[in-house]
Image (tube, rainbow, N blue to C red):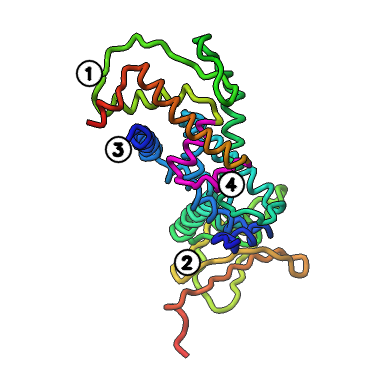
Amino acid sequence: MNDPDAGLVSRSREGDKAAFSKLVSSYYEMVYAVCYGVLRNREAARDTAQEAFMKAWREISRFKGDSKFKTWIYRIAMNAAIDAVRRRRPQVSLDATDVSDEEGQAPVIISDDRPGPREEASKDELKQMMARAVEQLSPDHRAILVLREWQGLSYEEIAETLELEMGTVMSRIHYAKKKLGEVLQRMGFNPREAMR
Amino acid sequence: MNQDELIGKLYREMIREEIDAADLETEKKRFIEANFQDRPVLFFRPDFMVPALMFCAVFMLFVRIWPQPVPVAGLPVEGFHAAVPAAEPAVAPVVSVGESQGPQVLPGQVTVERVASDAGMPVVYQRTVNNVPVTVIWVFPRQEFLPIP
């Protein structure tokens, strides 16, 4: 495997802080984005991203280079973010009719008491709706969505990062997007109108 | 653009907005400085170096302004008093001692009230020679007062 960070990783394993600081510098934004994608909170994302780097520094001597450093640090960040969101608050379903899904998890369905799509048609509002919709996804689905949509990782890379089967990755991505579409529609957003 | 693509686009815009707003560069620098930068040895650290340099500057200024008088062997130049036994009153009146190349012998015991010289830094000390207290006054002439070789 050809890891562009192999040199820096090797020096970091020998305790070279300067080398590790270059890795931090390269991946800080990406790790933060991954954490934010899961946690949806700036301070928590910052803390979790930094915690992930500190954990990587502590454990880099055990990193054997079986995967790329990028994959490894994503995995650490993802696990830290998912743990953090689970610690923060359990998800509660508000709609008993929509409890089961293909993952057996319980998404939260929000009631639609906001104005209709014509009143909420501006771009900013669309983004706000998207932000609220993402919050309805489980941490696992948020993780997979951010890796796919923001980091642009392939299914294989996501599978390696999250240590999942490819089929699970594909099904979760499909489910996350479908769920987002449904929640957005409940909020009054009509994708077909927005696409026109 | 289908619904999936639209959702993906909205999602990416939302994350991009957050990344732009979060001031990650500053946070990253602070984090790296705090955890992954070797701190310089104490003397070269700014929190030590700046006060140390300020102290040196103030000290040099002080030395420059007050270069004299420098007391020697713990004896103050101004107001130097030769030891006078309390039982014996000083017999000599106030005498002005002029500059001389050799020793001057004053009658009886004297009190040295003040030592000053335009030529350079005076040094005063006292020693006992054959049970006679002797007050020695040296003047170290400044460069311009030295004889031309």
- Res. B117 mark: 2
Residue on which the image places disc 4: A73
Same chain assignment for discs 2 and 1: no
Q: Quadrant of residue A19?
A: bottom right
Secondary structure, mark 4, is helix
Which residue lies at the image location 77% right of the left edge and 69% below the top edge? B130
Q: CA distance from mark 2 to mark 4?
A: 79 Å
Q: Is residue A49 magenta?
A: no
Which residue lies at the image location 52% right of the left edge and 61% below the top edge? B115
Residue on which the image places disc 1: A118
Marks 1 and 2: in contact by CB < 8 Å?
Answer: no
Which-is-in-front pick, marks 2 and 4?
4
Spot occupied by residue A115 in the image (x, y as percentages of width and height): 28, 12
Q: CA distance from mark 4 to mark 1?
A: 43 Å
- Res. B1 mark: 3
In the image, residue A55 sits, relative to residue A97, either above or below, namely: below
In the image, residue B93 sits, relative to residue B134, either above or below, namely: above
Within 10 Å of disc 3 (Cα), the crowding (few <14, some 14-19, many 20+) is: few
Q: Amino acid at mark 2?
A: Ser
Which-is-in-front pick, marks 2 and 3?
3
Marks 3 and 1: in contact by CB < 8 Å?
Answer: no
Spot occupied by residue B146 in the image (x, y as percentages of width and height): 47, 81
Which-is-in-front pick, marks 2 and 1?
1
Q: Amino acid at mark 1?
A: Arg
Segment tinted magenta in the rendering = A141-163
- Give the dominant element type of the magenta stretch: helix, strand or loop: helix
